[in-house]
Image (tube, grey):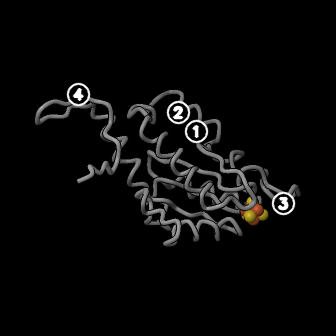
């Protein structure tokens, strides 16, 4: 019978009847395969996300199939769509209400840079108001691209040190956004 590896084991030492690794790696592995996304969808890119969670692309293969519409229950903010300057404070508040550790993905051209809407009323990229971890290009991005972005976030989550969120550098980053 073929041996099935569901996920790769973290680096560690193994021998007969034991496997030892660091606490940090176990936590990283568990977090990366149990992300709770909050879809902040304002326009067309949100439809691509709907396709991504549907059966054909099946985001549950990555352990991220349960969207949460309360920021208090989510750890991955997916911003999809055009963000107007009027909407910006709402997005910032949603981010502020998420508990640490939290990650942010800008899905599509609008969330990344304002996209085609180079106008006075549209925010020219959400990184003007909140820190972003991954940018997904495209107008709209295909579900494959959204999955690729999710996998990049998973790598980031797996390799993040447990102390990062308490570091001075992280404080400075948040202060630069007035958070
Ligand atoms: S990037 Fe394109 S598809 Fe996505 S919200 Fe903007 S206009 Fe719509």
Query: Depth-wise, is mark 4 or mark 3 nearer the camera?
Result: 4
Q: Could you tell me how far apart the alpha carbons at marks 4 and 1 are, in whole angstroms?
A: 37 Å
Considering only vertical position in the picture, is 63 above or below 176? Answer: below
First reached walking from the N terminus: tag 2 or tag 3 = 3
Label 4 SS: strand
**Residue 47, quarter of the rendered image:** bottom right
Residue with the mark numbered 1:
174
Label 1 SS: helix
Residue with the mark numbered 4:
13
Residue 170: mark: 2
Label 3 SS: loop
Label 2 SS: helix
Q: Position of residue 89 (x, y in %)?
A: 67, 57
Q: Could you tell me how far apart the alpha carbons at marks 3 and 1 are, in whole angstroms?
A: 25 Å
Q: Residues within 10 Å of mark 4 (few under 14, many from 20)?
A: few
Judge from the rendering whether residue 83 lies leftward or rightward of residue 155; answer left or right: right
Considering only vertical position in the picture, is 148 above or below 61? Answer: above
Residue in the picture at 23% in, 27% down: 13
Query: Depth-wise, is mark 4 or mark 1 nearer the camera?
Result: 4
Is there CB contact under 8 Å for labels 1 and 2?
yes
Q: Could you tell me how far apart the alpha carbons at marks 2 and 3 are, in whole angstroms?
A: 30 Å
Residue with the mark numbered 3:
121
Is there CB contact under 8 Å for labels 4 and 2?
no
First reached walking from the N terminus: tag 4 or tag 1 = 4
Residue in the picture at 11% in, 32% down: 16
Q: Residues within 10 Å of mark 2 (few under 14, many from 20)?
A: few
Residue in the picture at 43% in, 63% down: 60
**Residue 162, quarter of the rendered image:** top left
Q: Where in the image, quadrant-wise, is ligand 1 located?
A: bottom right
Q: Could you tell me how far apart the alpha carbons at marks 1 and 2 are, in whole angstroms?
A: 6 Å
């Amino acid at each position: 019978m073929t041996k099935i590896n569901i996920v790769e084991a973290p680096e560690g030492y193994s021998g007969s009847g034991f496997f030892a690794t660091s606490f940090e790696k176990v936590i990283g592995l568990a977090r990366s395969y149990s992300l709770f996304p909050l879809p902040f969808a304002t326009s067309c890119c949100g439809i691509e996300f709907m396709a991504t969670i549907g059966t054909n692309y099946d985001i549950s293969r990555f352990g991220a199939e349960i969207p949460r519409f309360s920021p208090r229950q989510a750890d991955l903010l997916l911003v999809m769509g055009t963000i107007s300057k009027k909407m910006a404070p709402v997005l910032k508040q949603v981010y502020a209400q998420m508990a640490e550790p939290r990650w942010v993905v800008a899905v599509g051209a609008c969330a990344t840079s304002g996209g085609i809407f180079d106008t006075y009323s549209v925010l020219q990229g959400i990184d003007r108001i909140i820190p972003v971890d991954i940018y997904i290009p495209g107008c709209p991005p295909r579900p494959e691209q959204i999955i690729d972005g999710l996998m990049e976030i998973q790598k980031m989550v797996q390799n993040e040190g447990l102390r990062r969120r308490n570091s001075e550098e992280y404080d400075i980053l948040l202060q630069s956004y007035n958070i």
